Image (cartoon, helix red, strand yellow):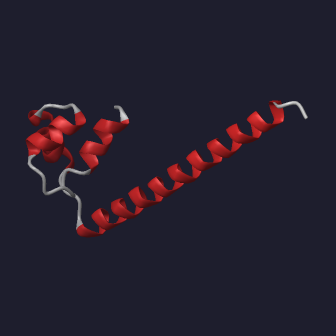
């Protein structure tokens, strides 16, 4: 299962958005969302809070990684130049 579908499945109880909107966003059918909801249930309040914390941390780490990638590219460019 790809990350997008996993993400959609994990947010079923966290989002107050209509099923159709969630399904469209993640490229799955409405029936798939209903099946996931039936199979996995919804998230508890503590789970939603933890999910949001993890999403924030993930975003922060992605930003740090992007900054490091830029630093590496800059250093490579500088090292290629002749002095």
- Name the foreground residue: 63 vs 12: 63
> Which of the 4 image quarters holds residue 7?
top left
Give x and y (percent) for residue 19: 10, 44
Q: Is residue 6 left or right of residue 78?
A: left
Left or right, residue 7 beside residue 29: right
Q: Kindly identify the residue that appears in the image at 70 percent across and 40 percent down.
A: 74
Identify the residue at the far front of this view: 83
Identity of the residue drawn at 56% across and 45% down:
66
* Number of numbered discs: 0
Task: Tell me which corner region of the image, top left, top right, bottom left or bottom right, holds residue 1.
Answer: top left
Depth order, front residue of 57/50: 57
| Residue 8 figure quarter | top left
Above/below status of 44 relative to 13: below
Q: In the rendered image of this protein, does residue 44 appear above or below residue 28? A: below
The residue located at (12%, 52%) in the rendering is 17
Residue 59 in percent (x, y) is at 45, 54
Pinpoint residue 52: horizontal percent, then vertical percent: 34, 61
x 57%, y 53%: residue: 64
Query: Residue 77 at x, y = what percent?
Result: 74, 34
Q: Quadrant of the C terminus?
A: top right
């Amino acid at each position: 299962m790809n990350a997008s579908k996993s993400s959609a499945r994990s947010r079923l109880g966290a989002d107050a958005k209509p099923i159709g909107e969630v399904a469209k966003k993640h490229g799955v059918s409405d029936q798939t969302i209903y099946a996931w909801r039936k199979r996995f249930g919804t998230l508890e309040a503590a789970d939603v809070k933890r999910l949001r914390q993890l999403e924030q941390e993930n975003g922060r780490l992605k930003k740090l990684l992007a900054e490091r990638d830029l630093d590496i590219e800059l250093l490579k460019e500088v090292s290629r130049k002749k002095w």
